[in-house]
Amino acid sequence: MLTRNEIMEKLREIVISADGGATLKAQRMTEDSFIMQDLGFTSIGMLYLAIAVEETFSIRFDGVGISDFVTVGNLVDYIAERAK
Amino acid sequence: MKWWPGKCRMGDMVRVRVGGIWHYGVYISDDEVIQFGLPPREGAAQSPDKVRVCQTTMEEFSGGSIIEVAELTRQEARRRLPPEKTARVARERLGEGGYNLLHNNCEHFAYECVLGEKRSEQEEGAQKRWRERPLAAVYLIRVPSALPDMTVEPAARAEQIMKTRDDSLRRQRFAAWQALAYGAKAQFHLPLSGLKKRWTGQWISDDFFLSIAHAGQWAAAAVSTRPVGVDLEPVSGQREKPWEQLARAMASPAEKQAFDLTKKEAVLALWTRKESAFKRGGGARFSPARVDGLAGGIRTFLPEEAACVLSLCGEHAGSAKLYLMRENGAEEIHPREWGTA
């Protein structure tokens, strides 16, 4: 099972890739960060985030929408339950 | 297909912009647009398990925004379902659930009803962006003194390695492949079983780009989301070579200016830069004099741990990470870079 820290590190890499290699948002990211407001993900960007999370953690978003995840912590909770 | 605001006809695919995303539906009449879920407007968010294929009006569907209608290409128009069948199929699916943002969304639904295939260009666009994200990683590994008992895939590569007559070369190839297997799993969560061999002898993947190199006691594998080339040469432990002659044979006037080719390290730097660029290009025959060792997108490293010169060429070389393979995994290293203090 991945630890929350390990999940956060991988999410940071996803945020960096989504931001074209810029690291500032990823460096400032905490579990309390709002995915859309703080990390700048637009609705189409959420598709990218969903794909990235599914592939990085080998999980699938079933029965939940990406908009169900308001904060990074919400996403970490979901991943922690499912990722091995 | 193209999209235009225009007159709709029964069986047309329609879409409306909601924030940064498109919401899709199937037009049957102004009073009947069938969609998978409601347009994701503020206040209308639905939990995916509650989302259903439902009917609405054009006015509701638009929410005051402009509706675009799909103009199919000739090929698409030929293979689409007849409009009456599209309408029937869409109506038959009313009440259906199973919504999934990535794998079964409103766009998939509309495509299926009109073209008979499940597709989402929005999802494909996001997939493409993810697959082409800036990623390049190099895994450096020490060549083992004996071949361990480990599986190599695909089988054709295992056979190739085992048939290598020279023991040192066999171990180098094995090590490079081991590094590649680790890198492919770490960065792309993929095994090497899907790799294929080109007629040039180069191994390729449908899912990522790769390059391997080996010399002396060290081997390296590079993986990336864009074409990549890696090469390395040991600094010591080689039989003395006529460095200056080699440099003269391969270096352009500009390269002779940029590199002090009386020094072995500089010659190795230039050589590995050229070879990594050649490998990135995927050509069949390496002519060093024809490859520009000063081109952009090439970085050269001097990892102390490996006493070698290593060059990486590729679009994402600038953000590449280097790892040294150890017994229990890989450790990121930050070696001195050629041309820096």
Image (tube, rainbow, N blue to C red):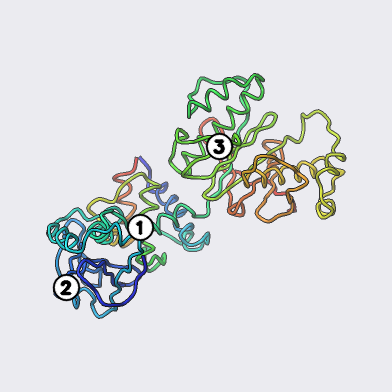
Kind of residue indicated by mark 3: Arg
Position of residue B289 relative to residue A24, above or below, is: above
Dot 2 crowding, Cα within 10 Å, few <14, some 14–19, many 20+ = some
Q: Position of residue B246 (x, y in %)?
A: 83, 39
Q: Nearer the viewer, residue B247 or B339?
A: B247
Percent across and percent down for residue B131 are 46, 52
Share a chain, discs 1 and 3? yes
User: As rendered, which of A10 and B132 lies closer to the eye?
Assistant: B132
- Tell me, yes or no, if residue A34 can be seen here: no
In 3D space, how far apart are the residues under numbered discs 1 and 3 (Cα atoms)? 30 Å
Q: Residues within 10 Å of mark 3 (few under 14, many from 20)?
A: few
Q: Which residue is mark 2?
A: B29
Percent position of residue B134, x then y: 52, 54
1 or 2: tag closer to the N-terminus: 2
Callout 1 touching callout 2 (CB < 8 Å):
no
In the rendered structure, which disc, 1 or 3, sits on the residue that comes first in sequence?
A: 1
Residue nearest the observer in this picture, A75 or B218: B218
* Disc nearer the start of the sequence (3/2): 2
- Report the disc number at residue B270: none
Amino acid type, label 2: Ser
**Residue topped by disc 1:** B123
Could you tell me how far apart the alpha carbons at marks 1 and 2 are, in whole angstroms? 27 Å
What amino acid type should be assigned to the residue bearing mark 1? Glu
User: Can you identify the residue that label 3 sits on?
Assistant: B198
Above or below, B128 relative to B324: below
Q: Secondary structure at mark 2?
A: strand
Q: Residue at x 68, y 29 (%)?
A: B217
Q: Chain of mark 2?
A: B
Under circle 1, the secondary element is helix
Subunit that carries the residue with mark 3 = B
Label 3 sits on a secondary structure element that is loop
